[in-house]
Structures are given as structure tokens and as C-alpha cells.
Amino acid sequence: MAPPPPPTPAARILRDYGWDLLLGSIAAFYAVMVPYTKVEESFNVQAIHDILYHNHHIDKYDHLEFPGVVPRTFIGALVISLLSSPAILMMRIFHVPKVYSLLAVRLMLGCVTLTTLRLFRVEIKRKYGRHVEAFFVILTAIQFHVLFYSTRPLPNILALAFVNLAYSFWFKGNFLCTLQALIVAAVVFRCDMVLLLGTIGIALLLSRSFSLLEAVKCCISTVLVCIGFTVLVDSIMWQRILWPEFEVFWFNSVLNRSSEWGTHSIHWYFTSALPRSMLVAYPLCLVGALLDRRIVPYVLPVALFVVLYSKLPHKELRFIIASIPMFNVSASLAAGRIYNNRKKSGWNFLYVLMLGAFLVSLGYSAVTFMASYSNYPGGHALKALHEADSSVKEKTVHIDAFTAMSGVSRFCENENPWRKILEGGRHFH
């Protein structure tokens, strides 16, 4: 019998990267349809803009005039700017409007985030099989928030990339690298990731994955390198000696001033945020932990991270978004078990119920997307204004605080005849 013909290049691409193309297409669709950013993303958006357009002229950078409540690191903005710079250079040569540069930057960030998610997915397939891998992708695709946020330059998303790396190392059995990835996320990008580092680190110590001495040596060396790197880079950019995430930690945790931006009840993450973000995967996650005890040592530390974070009064979904990929693995195990037993009595009803819940989740995500599309009035208003008649030699537009918080950034600027000022007579922000 003749051997089967080798797969075509297109077939090989689909076999190796089909799931990535699916998730990447959805994330790119969200970015193209909702290109504007909000106040939570403002620091990194302005920093990326200034790096790309002002280069080494730090005195022109936005953060020196509008420093914000707490400083943030420039390291993520520098990396994304470097990766995006060839595309931005071509756009500047051909005089493409700057808003498309914002889209290019966001798509590059999405590539970075989804590449780390791919590394995690590959380990899921190796550890649990292709059916679990497939359901992991499907559940991620029908959820809204992970893919919508994956292209948004939030410190949480920059940290999520390293958390995905940590999860992949964890599944691979490379436990010290797991700690190192989490340390980078905590020390450089989001100090609250120290909670996830703590719960996973304690779980690994209890399971004797490494000795206490090995862990201490690895953590101390990695922490010192990360602190040295972020202090070096950010002291230059902020023009004063500082470790940004330490100041964030002091403001949010020691002074507890984050509650000035609103508070939620202690159970909000489990009764509102996770159900809305995970949808059908939320009950499936619990079922997965009951059906397959192999996932419990992985899910339990991540769940404890959310429990510990619930102590902080100010709560937002993006604070615990790093937990969702691991919870989705547990949900995928449950979905895979239901799928494999779908022809058995009783299981067939669960299978039909699960498919119906998938469709409901997809519909909910579509409605959420439409709501988010209309949630950037400042960006849409400025775009409409730029499309108005430009016969006047100079036009001045006043940007109030709400507009600056709901879609307007320096990437939205057009060239003359427009001149923009922020509320209070300050320059456009």
C-alpha cells in the first residue's frame, strides 16, 4: 500500500498554527473594530507614542507633564515600540494617519501575548491531549475579555505574557523557570503578581519540586537582576531614581489608596467578574477539578491567588485576568470528558447541554463586544471632528477630561490645521 502523500504547505500551516490563526483573527478583529484606548491604558499608549515619535528627546515625553497617580515602567513600552518600529517607519514615510500606528502597535502586542499563550497551549496538548487543547482554544475564543484585552497596552497584559510563560514552564516541569517568569511579571510590570508567585511557589515547595535553598537562590538572583534593570531604565526615563512597581505597591497596598477609585464586595471576583469573563467555562472549571484530579495542584494555587486578591477593596477584572487561562484548562478537561463520552446514556444530554451553553456564551460575547464598541465616545468624536471641513487655516479643539479618558490619545492627533488643548489650557493629553 502506497504511503499517503505529504501534506501541502497550507495543510501544514493549518495543522501547526490553525488554532493560533483562529485566536489571532478574533483578537485582530477586536483591535480593528475598537482601535481606541482608555484611561487605564494611557501611560503605555503615550509612552509608546513618544518612543516612536520623539525617540531620545525625553524632554518632549508626555509623562513628564502628566505623570499620573503612580509611575509605571517603560520596559514594556520600549519592547513593543522596538518590535513595531519597522511598520511605523513605513507608515510615516507614506504619511499614513497616526491612528493606524496605534493599531499596528496593538496588533504587535497581541502577537506577543498570543505567542506566549501558544506556548502554554502546546504544553496543554502534550500533557492532556489534543481534545483538551481544542476545547481550551474554543473556550478562549468564545469568551470576550482575554482576546479583547490581549492587544491592549495595560500593565496587566504585559504581566499576563510572563504568566502564560510561567504556566507553560510549570506544565513542562521546569519549576525554577516558572518562578523566574512570575518574578519578572511581579517586579517589573505588576507588583500584585507577587500573590500568584507566592501561592504557586508554596505549592511547588510542598510538592518538593525543588528545595527551599534552590528556590531562595533562584528568586533572590532574579529579583536583583529585575530590580536593577527596571531601576536603570525607568530612572533614566522618569529622570529620578525609582522602582516603579514598588511605588505602585506602596500606593495600592500599604496606603490602600486604590479604594479611592471604587470598591466591591469581597466575593465580587467569584460572583461577578469570573462568571462574566469565563461564561460556560466557569461551571465547567469546577466540574473539571472534580472529574480530573490531575488539574487540582495547578488550579488550587491560582484560585488562592484570586482569594487573596479579593482582600483588596478596589477590584477590576483585569487584576485577575491572569487566572483565566489556567481555569480554562480545567474547564477544557471537563468539556473533553463530556465529548469523549457523548454517546453514552446520560452523557449525551450533558453534551447537548454543553453545546447549548457554548452558543449562549458566544451570544453573550457578541453583545459584550457591541457594548464595548460604543464605549469609546471620545475617540469617535475626535475622528468625526477630523473628518469635518478643513478649509480654515487653524482650528482649535478643547479636550476635556472625559474625552481624554474615553478614547483620545496622542495617536489620534492629526496634523495642521488642528491644534488641541486639554482642559485647563494645558496641551493635548
Image: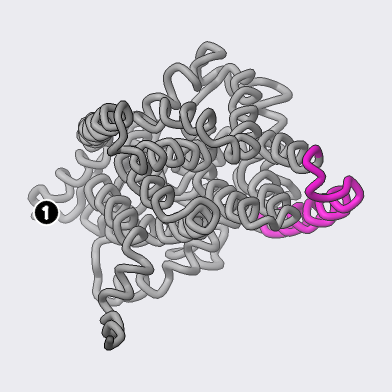
The x and y percentages for residue 336 are 39, 42
Within-10-Å neighbours for mark 1: few <14, some 14–19, many 20+: few
Front position in the image: 119 or 158: 119
Front position in the image: 196 or 31: 196
The x and y percentages for residue 257 are 63, 21
Q: Is residue 2 above or below residue 292?
A: below
Front position in the image: 297 or 194: 297
For the question of whether residue 368 can be seen, the reply is no
Residue 224 quadrant: bottom right
* Left or right: 317, with 249 as reference point: left
Residue 140 quadrant: top left
The residue lying furthest to the right in this view is 213
The residue lying furthest to the top in this view is 265
The residue lying furthest to the bottom in this view is 2
* Left or right: 167, with 418 as reference point: right
The x and y percentages for residue 382 are 22, 43
For the question of whether residue 407 can be seen, the reply is yes
Secondary structure predominantly adopted by residues drawn in magenta: helix
| Region rendered in magenta | 206-234
Task: Please tell me how many numbered marks the rendered image carries.
Answer: 1
For the N terminus, give its image quadrant. bottom left
Front position in the image: 186 or 360: 360
* Left or right: 84, with 418 as reference point: right
Q: Is residue 251 above or below residue 138?
A: above
| Residue in the picture at 60% in, 45% down | 72
The answer to whether residue 398 is magenta is no
| Residue in the picture at 24% in, 31% down | 352
Q: Which residue is mark 1?
A: 390
For the C terminus, give its image quadrant. top left
Q: Is residue 2 above or below residue 361?
A: below
Q: Is residue 421 above or below residue 304?
A: below
Residue 57 quadrant: bottom right
